[in-house]
Amino acid sequence: MATDLTKTQWTGILLNEELTTELDLSIFRTLYSFEGHKAFASQVGVILGYKGKSPHGALNLEMKL
């Protein structure tokens, strides 16, 4: 079920530290840097410095919370 947010509501969510962490903001900034604003979690994870076989693991956990 999709929900339409206004620009003001979205800004409020991004600025609310109880809802949006610094990691969340880093993920959004990194996604925005990709063409079409789309990327695999593993691509974002590598850019954010995660290494190993699962650079996407921490990001997938963050999105589930």
Image (cartoon, rainbow, N blue to C red):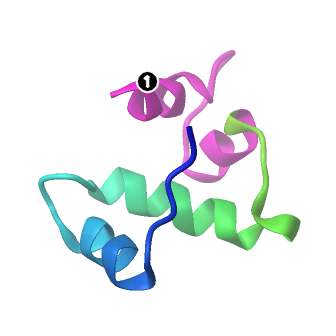
- Tell me if residue 6 comes above or below residue 65 in the rendering: below
SS class, disc 1: helix
* Residue positioned 55% across, 36% down in the render: 50
Residue 17 figure quarter? bottom left
Local crowd size for mark 1, using a 10 Å CA cut-off: few (<14), some (14–19), many (≥20): few
- Tell me if residue 59 comes above or below residue 34 in the rendering: above
Horizontal side of residue 58 vs 22, given as left or right: right
* Residue positioned 32% across, 74% down in the render: 9
| Residue that protrudes farthest toward the left in the picture | 18
Magenta stretch in the rendered image: 42-65
* Residue positioned 46% across, 28% down in the render: 58
* 4 vs 15, nearest the viewer: 4
> The N terminus lies in which quarter of the figure?
top right
> The C terminus lies in which quarter of the figure?
top left
| Residue that protrudes farthest toward the right in the picture | 35
| Residue that protrudes farthest toward the top in the picture | 53
Residue 15 figure quarter? bottom left
* Residue positioned 85% across, 67% down in the render: 36
Residue position for label 1: 61
Residue type of the residue flagged with mark 1: Leu
The spot of residue 11 in percent (x, y) is 34, 78
Horizontal side of residue 7 vs 40, given as left or right: left
The spot of residue 59 in percent (x, y) is 51, 34
The spot of residue 20 in percent (x, y) is 27, 56
State yes or no: residue 62 in magenta: yes
The spot of residue 44 in percent (x, y) is 66, 47
Q: How many marks?
A: 1
